[in-house]
Amino acid sequence: MAYDVDFNNVSTVGLESSSVGGALAGLRANEARYFKNKYSHVFAVEPASKAGQTIGWVHRILKQERDLVIQSRPLEATAFQVENIRIAYVFYESGLSINVMYTIDDKKKRAVGFKLSDGMEVPAELASRFKFARQKSKLAGTIRGSFLVIKGEY
């Protein structure tokens, strides 16, 4: 069952099996706050067991663009559109969050973002391929992030 992420009262609901569940919940709340403030969109997630199409789309992009396969188990996902941007998020048990920002009408503004929850190690499948920049968040502590530009059509 999908539920709205509350960024005022951060909860680990759905993320309990993660060893960095509190930090991952903060990261998820940080994303929810961003979309509420920028687009007035309510960020709702659903369990991975109900989000197969979204997770499949994200994983297909990773595989075809960079031959990447994420080793961690997906816990939750969401997909929605704001303005002309198709957006998908997958939150993983390791503390990793992956998002796809896919503009409908501008092929030059499509990317996959990787965010690491505070306290987690860089996943082996990403460590040698990406450099991660740090940013501070009141909700999530220190977030490390990186991205790749999408070149194909999905």
Image (cartoon, helix red, strand yellow):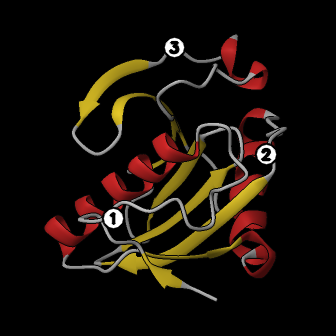
Instruction: Provide residue 2's location: percent of width, then percent of height.
Output: 57, 85
Instruction: Provide residue 29's location: percent of width, then percent of height.
Output: 36, 58
Of 83 and 116, which appears nearest the observer?
116
Q: Residue furthest left?
A: 37
Instruction: Provide residue 109's location: percent of width, then percent of height.
Output: 38, 51
Q: Nearer the viewer, mark 2 or mark 1?
A: 1
Q: Nearer the viewer, mark 2 or mark 3?
A: 3
* Residue where numbered disc 1 is placed: 32
Left or right: residue 117 compared with residue 9: right
Instruction: Provide residue 10's location: percent of width, then percent of height.
Output: 36, 60
Do callouts 2 and 3 mark residues in contact (Cβ within 8 Å)? no
Left or right: residue 101 compared with residue 42: right
- Kindly identify the amino acid type of the residue bearing the numbered disc 2: Gln
Rendered residue at 63%/66% (across/down): 14
User: Tag 1's secondary structure?
Assistant: helix
* Residue where numbered disc 2 is placed: 64
User: Rounded to the nearest whole Å, what is the CA distance between mark 2 and mark 3?
Assistant: 20 Å
**Which part of the image, by quadrant, shows the C terminus?**
bottom right
User: Tag 3's secondary structure?
Assistant: loop
| Number of the label disc, if any, that sits on residue 131 | 3
Decide: is 45 above or below 127.
below
Rendered residue at 33%/64% (across/down): 32
**Which part of the image, by quadrant, shows the N terminus?**
bottom right
Can residue 19 be seen by looking at this rendering? yes
**Mark 1: few/some/many CA within 10 Å (<14, 14-19, 20+):** many
Left or right: residue 103 compared with residue 24: left
- Kindly identify the amino acid type of the residue bearing the numbered disc 1: Ala
Rendered residue at 44%/55% (across/down): 28
- Kindly identify the amino acid type of the residue bearing the numbered disc 3: Lys
